[in-house]
Amino acid sequence: MVVTRFAPSPTGYLHIGGARTALFNWLLARKTGGKFLLRIEDTDQKRNTPAAARQVMEDLRWLGIEWDEGPEVGGPNGPYFQSQRKDLYDKYIKQLIDENKAYYCFDAPEELQQMREKAQAEKRNLIYPRPEEFPDEGDVKKARAQGRPVTVRFAMPAEADIVVNDVVRGEVKFAASEISDFIIQKSDGFPTYHFACVVDDELMGVTHVIRGQEHLMNTPNHQALQDALGFRRPIYAHMSVTVSESGGKLSKRERPKALHKAIKEMPDIDIAKLAGIAKISDNELKHFINRGVSPPMAAIDAMAEYLGVHLPEINVVDFFKSGYLPEAVVNFLALLGWNPGDEREIMQLDELISAFDLGRLTKANSLFDRQKLIAFNTEHIRMVSDDKLLAHFKDYLKAVGSAAAGADDALLARLIQINAGARTLADIEKKSRFIFIDNDEIQYDEKAVKKVLLKHDGLTILRLVGERLAKLDEITPATIEELLRGMAEERQVGLGKVAQPLRVAICGTTISPPIFDSVDILGIKDTLRRIENALKKFGI
RNA sequence: GGCCCCAUCGUCUAGUCAGGUCCAGGACACCGGGUUUUCAACCCGGCAACACCGGUUCAAAUCCGGUUGGGGCUACCA
């Protein structure tokens, strides 16, 4: 049976690149009727938090990626947090030491740094100088007494070159002389990623490892470890990396970077005010502005929202909050470095599963094209069932704290319906805002007022529209349409001449859902009130 | 610097492994037009690529070598 896994290090939100890795592993498991498991790689005491692990799980679930084994769902191979598996790793490390396949080291970080620099200067890679004789327990005690750090290093067998047989890249050869002994146990007693990963993959019966190309160079180390421990070897597939417009890997730092750039271009910034919004000190903010030292993500998000700066989505949660559907994100992600081999692009989850094939992973890196994602999202909003869309919309409204969050299902469903063709849930929300604000709190867009109300006879028409609407017995989209079309015909003008002033009066902008529905939903009373307000405010 | 990976329209890609059916197909973006009560959506049309050099072959996007370019790794992070 195929067993795949996703093994994130929980340092924060789930990154979109991580989501893609998870997706491919999940897809393979589902396609083959195998198992997909989730393992939390939290061996770095300094960087990992339990809250982050929960967040990663929430993000995976939002995408629809459920694990068969792992945290919260359990399974026979637990625990699924590496921090709770230390005794397991210790056992294997001891085994390697006993067999003379690993040895203790007592180097200080600065000493290692020096060695690296020297190697660099000599135009070669650092190959750790393995001692003739391995230190014994007595040496360890002595080193500890002297306060030296104690690590364990794997003794790389030097006989043969290592060949990685990769599903995506074929045979990749590594010269034995190029591979250094590497640390498998840190001075805090925890295993390094390489070691924990190899042990767990074996113990959990992982058969296929799909991971980013950045791990290709680690694979010879992993294989050597597997051989030394007598482990089986999973099938490896190293996927291409997703890069951003700016060149390198899509990185979490892009959001602070984008905000920093935007702020730099703003003429005057009220430091105290902005720091308050971000809930950071003035100093922290100054450090950010002047030196690019990023405050916490929450502060970045708060400032961006306040300043109206759109930050590039990087974490899964960012896409959620920008109004993307998980179906669209998953579909788009799947097509980054994979394709079904025919001309299908817009696909549902079940289609992706049945079409998935490891052999069709592409080799070249791909750029994350947000425009195409939006196109996918538009398509998925159109395709998804009404029930699901409503559920997504409600989740979205809640997440962004929209005024519409409290509205009943019928209203929300209607808002979705009249906004057919929307690109994101954010578009629908934005176009619906006018319904949820007080009549007196409408923000009139200056350009819209100038162009529509103050030019020609905008205000005159608006007053007339108000008078006629007031006399209408029955208010439905159809009767409103009849009325407005009649007026346009009467005056020998296009419908726009009649509709636009009304639109600006009730929404404050020239952008809204179809006007007949907008008036109907807002209600005649509020509509008339807003017309009156506008007439008063802008002249007549 | 060293090691490793990659290279088709602006972007994601099909085609490359089994060379001819490819003066290279689709999608997004873009441009032009249409529809239209705004935005969006929608419809029609258009632009646009085999990185370069050499080799193998009757024939190369496809095989081989090199060059260039891009990316990754180079941690007691994962």
Image (tube, coloured by chain):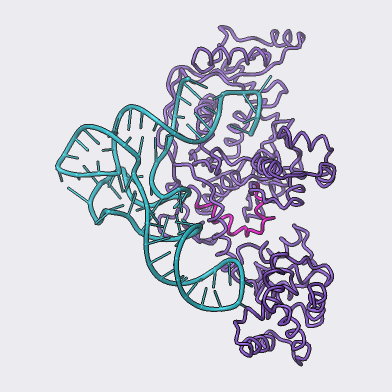
Chain colours: A purple, B cyan
Q: Is residue A183 above or below residue A332?
A: above
Residue toward you, A385 or A526: A526
Q: Is residue B6 left or right of residue A489?
A: left
Most prominent secondary structure in the magenta stretch?
helix
The spot of residue A329 in percent (x, y) is 59, 55
Q: Is residue A142 above or below residue A485?
A: above
Residue shown at 51% from the left, 25% from the top: A224
Residue toward you, A1 or A463: A463
The spot of residue A122 in percent (x, y) is 50, 12
Residue toward you, A9 or A309: A309
Residue toward you, A287 or A355: A287
The spot of residue A299 in percent (x, y) is 77, 44
The spot of residue A414 in percent (x, y) is 69, 75
Magenta part of the chain: A315-335
Q: Is residue A53 left or right of residue A157?
A: right
Residue B65 in which image quadrant: top left
